[in-house]
Amino acid sequence: AGTTMDTATRVQRYLITETFPKTFSNKYLSTGVVVGVALFLIFSSGADGKGALALWPLFGAVNQTLAALALLVVSIYLKGRSRWGWLVSLLPAIFMFAVSAWAAVENQIRFGSKHNLLLQILNIIIIISMVWVAIEGIAIFSKTKYSPTLMEEEMKKAA
């Protein structure tokens, strides 16, 4: 758990330092902000430290979207190298996108019924990102053409 927390803190610190280089050039300030936000999330529902559990449904939807994106990248790669091999990864990618979108919509309904504005806003950002990834993926996939010569060139390089 300590390694995960250290890595997450480091990555978040790098992200805010790169996003706001003038404001967060001091590593102690940026680390303090990251740890402060984490503590706020942890204790936002009380001293029991279960506040961050509210983020778990958001994490699940984002995680499944990343899985769908990985499958989509594999599908695009395979489409350029085989006639029908891309179906092996595209069908699961479509399923993963559908399930994660459904989960995000369910989350939005649940967060709305509980009047949790912060989670609603975060979930809307996630839904917009999902739609964006889907549109970009469809555009790139539709432009990718099968190229048998590409496969032959790769075979020669490997030999």
Image (cartoon, rainbow, N blue to C red):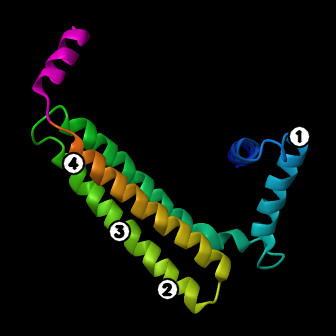
Q: Main secondary structure of the magenta part?
A: helix
**Mark 1 burial class by Cα count in 10 Å: few <14, some 14-19, many 20+:** few
Residue ID for mark 4:
142
Residue ID for mark 1:
26
Magenta stretch bounds: 146-159
Per the image, label 2 sits on a secondary structure element best described as helix
Q: CA distance from mark 3 to mark 2?
A: 15 Å
Q: Position of residue 10 (x, y in %)?
A: 74, 42
Q: CA distance from mark 1 to mark 3?
A: 41 Å
- Could you tell whether 72 is left or right of 125 in the image? left
Amino acid under label 3? Val
Amino acid under label 4? Ser
- The label on residue 109 is 2
Identify the mark nearer the N-term, 1 or 2: 1
Amino acid under label 1? Asn
Extreme residue toward the top, this view: 159
Determine the residue positioned at 50% across, 78% down.
107
Per the image, label 1 sits on a secondary structure element best described as loop
- Could you tell whether 121 is left or right of 60 in the image? right
